[in-house]
Amino acid sequence: MYNPANQYRCTIIRGKSQTDMEDLLPLYANMVHKFCPCEEEQFKTSCYRILSKALFATEAYNQMSNSNQKTVQNHLTEIAGTLLGLYYPCYDYKSGKTYIYESESCKYLIDNEDYPTFFKNLCLNFQFPNGAKWFQYIEEDINNNIRLKPFCYVVNLLYYAQRQLEKELLTKQEIGYYVLNNLDVLQGNVPCSIVYDQIMRDRRNNTKREKLSGSYAWQHIKEQFNLLELANIIETDATYVWLNKEETESIACLIKHKDDFIFDAYKYMISSKAERAVYLEDWKTAYGQFNQELLNVHTKFNGNVVILGRDKQNAHSGATKSSVDLGDEGEALVFRLEQERVRNYKERLVNKVLLLGKTKGLGYDISSIEADENPSRPEFARYIEVKATKRVTEPSFDSPSWMDSLNITAKEWVAAEQYGEFYNIYRVYFTKARTFVVRIPNPFKKAEKGELEVYPTIYQMNFDASVIEKRYAE
């Protein structure tokens, strides 16, 4: 039985705007990566200092106002931890302490810098009930037999809609009212075909339903649309929602796993305080897992495709797996830009631009020349290390709080010191609308002057027999 009027508010943590979320994501991830694993209080103290500096230009967290301290706490626990699942706690019964560990999804983000895939994994793992609410609301969800993966369900519904003869686009209000705020759907009892037929029937009969609006009734719906957009799964305008035709394999993955729950909320006796702690720990551990299937969903387009686009839901060109990874794509782009820059300066010098990314041990990806950007030394060599990242929104470079992080190897940092003013990091941002390339000249000197922060995340230890104690030999 499906009754559209059977409404139920199933909330989700309130995040930031899409741009702010992507601007802050590298800060969150690198902060977690830097300090984990460590004891919980040490983790909080270290992260509060980093976040205070990023958000309020001071490391003196303890000297800030209560309001600002609460903001910092919210960024760490509610957004980085509960919503994004970048870390999880683990209680050590021997020591009686809780330790914080970096999640698989955070490690993926650090290694690949692919924001949309990170958010795809979040959407794939997210479910109701979960451990992202106060326990009074978790109990309410369990008592109401809630059991749904909302992002997967919405994707499946949109896919079903585009396959029908009428090819009707669904509105945000319809998905909010008939799906994400409906108890019957949230209980996992209603096939998407039933929901779609009800929406079409109400349209034909001009049946007026309650409009969801305001922070209380609409904010949790809006947050779910935001996350699906950050995952690059859906596209929207002011009224309608449709699937992104360039994400065929990702969409197929979400539909495939729509009934695969990573966490069973119903096996816990959450009336017990100790069981509640186990519940939260188990949820956060599961939520931070990374689905390896998502490693193979990057797409290009040529030929026939399953997913339809916005324009009258007509068929668009099809999808094949991309054989180019993010790093290679960034290097290829910068290589072309450097060739063009040098060619515009002097055609005969374009052969000085060399793509060397596959050559091990150099500490840079491209060898070029200074050309027009250094008139007094135009033919001096320029050494370029390319660092590419992928995100949906455009970076807000002009925002006072904007910052970014990237990983650099020991060899790259040695090269930065060795080549000094002739060493450059080119940061490439592949976004949905445009691609941005920015340059960081002489990063080693900037680090010495405190203009940017560099810290080691891996140490190499060399030792000889004089420092060891033999304990076991078979």
Image (cartoon, rainbow, N blue to C red):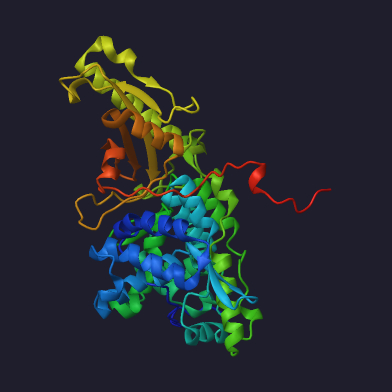
**Extreme residue toward the front, this view:** 466
Q: Position of residue 232 (x, y in %)?
A: 41, 52
Relative to 135, 16 lies left or right:
left
Relative to 467, 65 lies left or right:
left
**Extreme residue toward the left, this view:** 375
Count of labels in the image: 0
Position of the N terminus, as image quadrant, is bottom right
* x 24%, y 65%: residue: 56
| The quadrant where residue 431 appears | top left
Q: In the depicted view, which residue is nearer to us: 202 or 357?
A: 357
Relative to 115, 264 lies left or right:
right
Q: In the depicted view, which residue is nearer to us: 385 or 377?
A: 377
Q: Position of residue 347 (x, y in %)?
A: 24, 11
| The quadrant where residue 104 appears | bottom right
* x 27%, y 39%: residue: 445
**Extreme residue toward the top, this view:** 348
| The quadrant where residue 415 appears | top left
* x 33%, y 74%: residue: 218
Q: Is residue 143 above or below residue 160?
A: below
Q: In the depicted view, which residue is nearer to us: 197 or 285?
A: 285
Q: Is residue 448 above or below residue 342?
A: below
Q: Position of residue 333 (x, y in %)?
A: 35, 30
